[in-house]
Image (tube, helix red, strand yellow):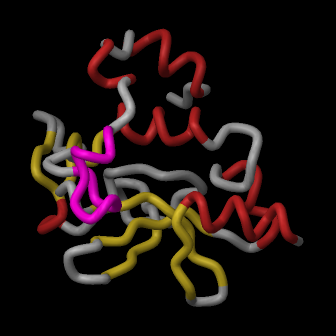
Amino acid sequence: MSLSIKELSASQSLDHAANQRVNESDSIDGALPALRLMDGSRLVRENIEHMGGGGVSQNNHDQGFRAAFRDDATGTVVLARFQDGTPAPMHLLDGLPDDWVVERSDTGRAVTAKPSVVAGFVRWGRFYTRKEAAEAVENE
C-alpha cells in the first residue's frame, strides 16, 4: 500500500518528540545527530522539510537522481530498494544491508537503521544529501 506524506503523518500520528528538530548541541560536529536512528518517521520528517524542492524523489527523478542511502561511518552508498531487492523510486528501509538494520518487524521488514545512515540520492556515480540534491536541482 502506498501513502502520501500527509496520509503517513496522519496515520502514524507522529508524536511531539518525533517532530522536534535536532538541536545543534545534539549533533556531532554539527552534522550527525547523536543516537538518532534512521526510521520511517525520520524519512517522513525529511520529506516534509524538503517538500516542494529537489530534496525529494518526486521532484528530482527527472534530473537523474535515484533514492539512495549512505552509511557515514563507512562511506558506503546503496540505492534504495524494495524488500525483494529491486530498485525503489523512493527511500525505503527494506532493502538496506543487514548490517545497517538495527530492528526488523515480525514480518522481516526493516524498522530502524543505524544513526549513521543518511537518506540522499545518487546521480552520475556521486552521492548527494537531500540538501545538495535540492541545490543542484534549483541551479539547473
Q: Position of residue 46 (x, y in %)?
A: 49, 41
Q: Position of residue 14 (x, y in %)?
A: 36, 16
Which residue is more in the foreground, 74 or 85?
A: 74
Quadrant of image for the C terminus: bottom right
Which residue lies most toward the bottom here?
125
* Magenta segment boundaries in residue numbering: 23-33
Which residue is more in the foreground, 27 or 65?
A: 27
Name the side, left or right, on which 71 lies relative to 48.
left
Q: Residue at x 34, y 54 (%)?
A: 83
Which residue lies most toward the front here?
25
Q: Residue at x 38, y 10 (%)?
A: 13
Above or below — where is 115 with respect to 46? Answer: below
Which residue is more in the foreground, 74 or 40?
A: 74
Name the side, left or right, on which 27 lies relative to 3.
left
Q: Quadrant of residue 16?
A: top left
Q: Position of residue 90 (x, y in %)?
A: 55, 52
Above or below — where is 135 with respect to 42? Answer: below
Which residue lies most toward the right here?
140
Q: Is residue 129 magenta?
A: no
Q: Is residue 28 magenta?
A: yes
Q: Position of residue 80 (x, y in %)?
A: 45, 62
Name the side, left or right, on which 50 lies relative to 96.
right
Name the side, left or right, on which 65 lies relative to 101.
right
Which residue is more in the foreground, 128 or 79?
A: 128
Q: Residue at x 38, y 33 (%)?
A: 21
- Give the total number of marks visible in the rendering: 0
Above or below — where is 40 with respect to 24? Answer: above
Q: Residue at x 50, y 63 (%)?
A: 120
